[in-house]
Amino acid sequence: MIVLGIETSCDETGIALYDSERGLLADALYSQIDMHREYGGVVPELASRDHVQRVLPLVKQVMSEAGIERSGIDAVAYTRGPGLIGALLVGTAIARSVGFVLGVPVLGVHHMEGHLLAPLLEEEPPEFPFLALLVSGGHTQLVDVAALGSYTLLGESIDDAAGEAFDKAAAMLGLDYPGGPNIARLAQQGREGIYKFPRPMTDRPGLDFSFSGLKTFTLNTVAAADADGGITEQDKADIARAFEEAAVDTLAIKCRRALRQTGRKRLVIAGGVSANQRLRQKLDEVVTKEGASLFYARPEFCTDNGAMIAFAGCRRLQAGQRDEEGMNPMPRWPLEDLKPVEL
Ligand code: KG4
Ligand code: ZN
């Protein structure tokens, strides 16, 4: 089965063709980051308008790269939610129209399930069951994955998401949006142990996260450094490093706790923040000590992309799932509400 995947939940238009037999055939991405940068974050109305412009040219591009004609597409998968409603509506409308014209089934996919399954596109995919840490710009969740589509939420952020914390800390340091990769780059010049940031909520039992305290701590540290003769580039790098270490440690402590609690031997990390090198290194240490293994996607499939939607959609379409009549994007959509996939 060859599935066309369409991702338009936020500020990236991602399109891909995935073949259940041959794997990923082609994928293409258009990032709107340059457009949103001057506003310091995503402007929803601009995002929607831009998706309208990008989807069809990218669909044509992946079809030509994969050497697939219209008649070769067996189904369409698109991101139904969660995400920005206008952006989701664009993907939904186009996917439904393409499905109607081609006379093929269409299925709306959960964006976070897409992220969660993205590591399965790699050469040595994790087997089920596993524990998953989903860390994106909008979500920070620890999920027990018993099987495909069978998700139990073990913990989540009670305030900011991990990626959001990176983005806000970056803005405080005068770095561009999206802040995660910029913080990581600056942190490489930072010295160890100059600043000591808190590890929020790690001294309490449970698997929930909190990142707003880290944000306030960053703000106060920047203000203090500024008051103390003006903040220097080295100060900024030291703060970026201390922030990144604290955010990574906080995530790692909860992952270790969740591994012990569930007894799972595989940890999958997914979402934009899973591209972070320090996080990967730290979790590698943690899983090794716990006798478990770590899995993640290649960096371009950690952030938003069409391949993960084509892949997740393909698994569900193969199991016979299809959209009902009418368009029904879901800006809010708990992962636990998904139907298990029975093959
Ligand atoms: O999954 P994603 O592309 O979009 C959402 O679904 O939200 O995640 C985007 C988030 C942003 O907050 C970005 O700053 C963060 O992922 N991010 C990173 C890195 N690359 C992207 N955070 C830390 N380190 C990175 N290398
Ligand atoms: Zn995402």
Image (cartoon, helix red, strand yellow):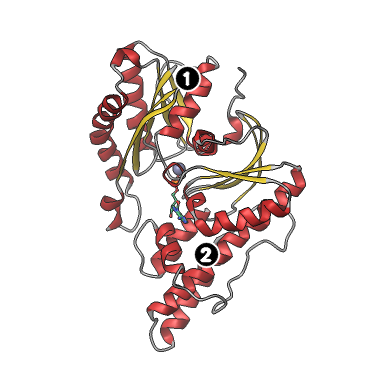
Q: Where is residue 289 in the image (x, y as percent from the top left)?
A: 72, 54
Question: Quick one: 238 or 156, which is closer to the camera?
Answer: 238
Q: How crowded is mark 2: few (under 14 residues within 10 Å), some or many (20 or more)?
A: many
Q: Which mark is residue 31?
A: none
Task: Name the residue located 47 percent from the left edge and 37 percent from the top edge.
Answer: 82
Residues packed near mark 1 inside 10 Å, few (<14), some (14 to 19) or many (20 plus)? few
Which sits in the foreground, 288 or 331? 288
Numbered disc in front, either 2 or 1: 1
Quarter of the image with the C terminus in it: top right
- Residue 186 in which image quadrant: bottom left
**Which disc number belongs to residue 21?**
1
Ligand 1 within 8 Å of disc 2? The answer is yes
Task: Name which residue type carries label 2.
Answer: Glu
The residue furthest front is 123
Question: Seen in the image, is 243 located left or right of residue 181?
Answer: right
List x then y, in percent, for residue 21: 47, 20
Judge left or right: residue 112 versus residue 76.
right
Q: Position of residue 250 (x, y in %)?
A: 62, 60
Q: Residue at x 30, y 39 (%)?
A: 48
Which quarter of the picture shows residue 108? top left
Distance (Cα) linking label 2 and label 1: 40 Å
Please identify the residue farthest to the top as the structure is shown: 103
Q: Can residue 336 be seen in this view?
A: yes
| 302 versus 308 height, above or below | below
Please say whether residue 329 is visible from this viewpoint: no
Q: Measured from the top left, where is residue 181 in percent x and y?
A: 42, 58
What label sits on residue 244 in the rendered view? Answer: 2
Quadrant position of the N terminus in the picture: top left
Circle 1: element type? loop
